Amino acid sequence: MSLPDPVADGVASGWRVLDGAAQTQDLQLSCDVLIIGTGAGGGMTAEVLAQAGLDVLMVEEGALRTSRDFRLLEAKAYPELYQESASRKTADKAINILQGRTVGGSTTVNWTSAFRTPPETLAWWGERYGLQGLNPQAMAPWFDLAEARLGIADWQTDPNPNNSVLERGCQALGLKHGRIRRNVRGCWNLGYCGMGCATNAKQSMLVTTIPGALQHRAGLLARARVDRLLPAADGKTLQGAEGSLLAADGHGLTGRKFAVRARHVVLAAGAIGSPAILLRSQLGGAQVGRRTFLHPVVVSGAVMPQRIEAYNGAPQTVYSDHFMHTQPLDGPLGYKLEVPPVHPLLMGVTLSGFGAASAGLMQQLPHLQVVLALLRDGFHPDSQGGQVRLRQDGSPELDYPLNDVLWDGVRRSWLTMAELQFAAGARQVQVLHEQADLQSSWKATRAQILQLPLKPLLARVVSAHVMGGAAMSSQPEEGVVDEYGRHWQLRNLSIIDGSVFPTSIGANPQLSIYAFALRAAHHLRDALNRG
Amino acid sequence: MITRRQLIKTGMAGSVVLLAAGFLASPQPDLPAASQGRLVFLQAADAQIIRSLAPVMLGMAGLALDDIVRGVDVAIAHLLPAVQQELRQLFDLLGNRWARRWLAGVHSPWAQATPDELAAFLQRWQQSPLLLLRSGFQALHALINAAWFGNPASWSALGYQQPQQVMGLLP
């Protein structure tokens, strides 16, 4: 018996799927709606529009990989499924960014954590940015719809030991905590979500809305990078887009080009990709690429007396928002506590230190327990996020300076995580910093954390959530798009992905993107069917 | 706490080092080590640097160094051209005997350097006040760790294995 691969079967049955690497000539295509990017925003939009009878074409930079390609192997998954082999970095290299680059985008490789946008975030957008239409009551039906489509529900199985430590630590310290809802159906509880789901249990765009769109005669062009949008002569609309077909290695150019003419263009290339396409097209104005947020993440490792095997079992099932609520929203940065899955390659790369000390830790892998703190950026006046810009070759780079307000959150969250791990029975704890080492008591760890210098590339900082850079606003000059993702200047361009968020979300963002995308896509569908 | 101003200063100092590296990095490379088979990005001299540093970086003896070199090469081959260019500069810099001696502080050629000398170099760059040197250490750290721990040969020493209930069902 081998596992089914319904997406590969669909392609074999005649879905309209083109591989850029396989094309022997330039492509000239046309459609009603061109969707650039197939992640949470593009995937949701594609299904809504294709079901309404519109001729939809999805274009994706990454390759079409399906469950038969997912072998629970980091060294295969990271180069094939992630931006820059899972080692995309901010300009000074201080933050490592995990972001998908495959059909389904980050939804193909995320850890299946599903949170509705926190009400305080939506309320802040209303007060601060005039986006009252996105209030919690108005958004509720879109969350309901996304949850129903993707099987988002409570996770009935016990947390794995890695998550249980977080839960026990919260209980011991009296911190509010909860269980994480997940977008899975028939999950095997394996723990390899980050390498693509081999059993198709994860309800990513790859196995839900993209097949849904393809069944409604949508097309998909993979391994095709959009170089620029093509403005019409009037300067107020787009004619479509053009780009380069990528070779089988996923990066090299075949020399073949493609061009798409479309009535409407949806930019859904993610919060680094979408601003980059606008910048390469010299479109969009001064706000493009500004205020890009990351939920910067810092990490603490513990050696537990019992086996944890943090590589096995659903990766994220317990969280704590306690420290999201202990200070004002725009005060010292709040942080969310979760745990990551711990696999050898990513752990080896992420651990600080070198030589015998890190070898000693790696050899205790089955006993390692890891907590992460995700900092809520974009609310404090000094937390302005980063700026997407272009390198000379046109590739995007995010300049995200780490400043005092972030470092303050880093130190507070290290202290919380270490105390929590000891409270849950850790034998030793080490926060990930190049001058930290394993400590055997909370008191000693605390003393060490208080004197660690807060500098880029000494403290380990990572991110899996890129948001902002093409913000929604209530006034044209204050952002890039309106609350439906409609571009303020270009009448047939919508941006429907995480780049439209005016701040970070304050929770894992996939469900926020799904709900925003459903709302924007239904609005667009009605407008296109009227016109 | 580091201020923005200090950060800018460090960044500028970093650029000066890089500029100096540009001048240093072309003439008089150390003699290349024996050839490594078919590598895409790494040249023989780069491969020697990885072979010398990997046991010290990983804190392990008896490593399959050929596999690590190949793993690093494959990892780099998957990176963006802009990032590959930076790594080219890093390896050219480390491969230059003057830069090796004065910037890395390693007096013997890489193939002959002692573990203590190599560890001192790694620690100096890991803890350097210059952002650029810290990023050089981090690049070597990430590449060598990814090459080794991405290789199933490393797993038994960690007590790690893939979930058996599903591996047999994969194509």
Image (cartoon, coloured by chain):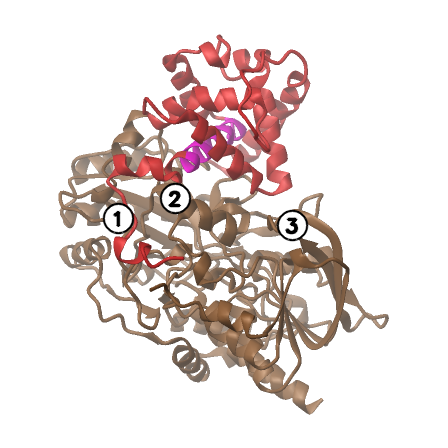
Chain colours: A brown, B red
Q: Residue at x 48, y 60 (%)?
A: A106
**For this rendering, which residue is in front, A9 or A442?**
A9
The residue at which mark 3 appears reads as A389
Q: Is residue A451 magenta?
A: no
Image quadrant occupied by the N terminus of chain B: top left
Please rate how many residues cluster around mark 1, counting C-alpha atoms within 10 Å: few if below 14, some from 14 to 19, many from 20. many
Query: Residue A417's mark?
Result: 1
Q: Secondary structure at mark 1?
A: helix
Residue B56 at x, y = what percent? 37, 22
Badge 2 or badge 1: first in the primary sequence: 2
Q: Chain of mark 2?
A: A
The residue at which mark 2 appears reads as A346
Question: Seen in the image, is B56 located left or right of residue A287?
Answer: left
* Residue A228 showing in the rendered view: no
Q: Which residues are magenta?
A: B130-147
Question: Seen in the image, is A402 located left or right of residue A337?
Answer: right
Question: Nearer the observer, disc 3 or disc 2?
Answer: 2
Q: From the viewer's perspective, is residue B5 above or below residue A61?
A: above
**Magenta stretch, main secondary structure class:** helix
Q: In whole angstroms, how far apart are the C-alphas of marks 2 and 1?
A: 20 Å
Q: Which amino acid is tagged 3?
A: Arg
Quadrant for residue A321, please give it: bottom left
**For this rendering, which residue is in front, B95 or A208?**
A208
The reply to whether dot 3 and dot 2 touch (C-beta < 8 Å) is no
